[in-house]
Image: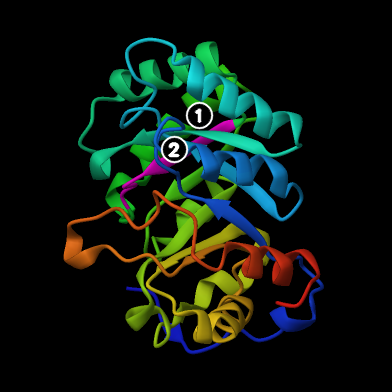
Amino acid sequence: MPHLISTRAGTSSTGVRTGLGVPGCAHPLLAAAEWDALARTGPPLHWVVLDVAGGPGVQPDPHCLDAAGRLRNAGVRVLGHLDTAYGTRPFAEVIAEAHRYLEWYQVDGFLLEHCPADRATLPQVRRTVGALRALREDAHIVLGHGTHPHPGYAETADQLVTFRGPWRDYRWSQVAEWTADHPPERFCHFVHGVPRGHLDEALRIARWQGAATIWFTDRTDRGGSADPWEALPGYWDDIVSRIGTGVSE
């Protein structure tokens, strides 16, 4: 268990630009307006995850191909969604899905969702990431732990998701001390249930904890019965404006 502290000194003066990492919207047929808005957003987006059907699906989807193409044309990375099931999915199955993402959608990298976080599974995750980089050398790899993992994971991928959960937990959260050894560009926070009136507070927490990629939404999981990431926040234009103009800094 890493030692935890309440803030991360020094990140407020780094000049690092906060940006948005989109964990995934609903299918473009169900969320056409959301995908259109993402394609118009541009630079404030660090990347957008494409989740066709809990992965790449069993055949190419023209609607997803169009959505991914419009994002890349706007200069936004598109990441394929690979669910590792906390290390329980077979290695070959995960890599086969990565192959399909690359062949069908020309993705720029991958989000390894439900990524294990303990030391014992670190070699397994390193093997997976190594295989993904063999498929595409410049792939942008994000490990979706949702919590602070063993520090060794920081050397394995481009970014780590070190918080994923509700606002009620995030506002009192603490950051692992070891993260101070790495720049904010390495860390992501996904927070749901953030009220519009607390958006500035949430942005300050991310800045002081040293996370440069964030996704804040007022959508909730409705007690675990809904996906809070499938639609854009109700204050989408507001958060894009704040981040795009550097207000969060």
Q: Which mark is residue 169?
A: none
Q: Residue at x 82, y 72 (%)?
A: 15
Is residue 113 inside the magenta stretch?
yes
**Residue 107 visible from this viewpoint:** no
Q: Residue at x 63, y 77 (%)?
A: 207
Q: Residue at x 24, y 40 (%)?
A: 85
Q: Could you tell me which secondary element the residue under label 2 belongs to?
A: helix
Amino acid type of disc 1? Answer: Gly
Whether 47 is among the magenta residues is: no
- Disc 2 residue type? Arg
Q: Return the residue nearer the eye: 38 or 186.
A: 38
Relative placement, left or right, of 238 versus 197 is right
**Up-down relation of residue 180 to residue 122 (above or below):** below
Q: Position of residue 34 (x, y in %)?
A: 53, 45
Q: Which residues are magenta?
A: 109-116
Front-lying residue, 120 or 242:
242
Indicate the quadrant containing the N terminus: top left, top right, bottom left or bottom right.
bottom left
Task: Name the residue beneath numbered marker 1.
Answer: 130
**Which quarter of the figure has residue 213?**
bottom right
Q: Looking at the rendering, in which quadrant would you find the C terminus?
A: bottom right
| Numbered label tally | 2
For the stretch drawn in magenta, the main secondary structure is strand
Q: Position of residue 94 (x, y in %)?
A: 34, 25
Residue hosting label 2 = 126
Query: Which element type, helix, strand or loop, lies under badge 1?
Result: helix
> Horizontal and vertical percent for residue 111?
46, 40
Q: Are marks 2 and 1 in contact (CB under 8 Å)?
A: yes
Q: Relative to residue 50, is residue 11 depicted above or below?
A: below
| Residue sitting nearer the eye, 124 or 195 | 195
Query: Measured from the top left, where is residue 55 in percent x and y?
Result: 35, 28
Q: Can residue 95 be seen from the camera position used here?
A: yes
Q: Is residue 130 left or right of residue 87?
A: right
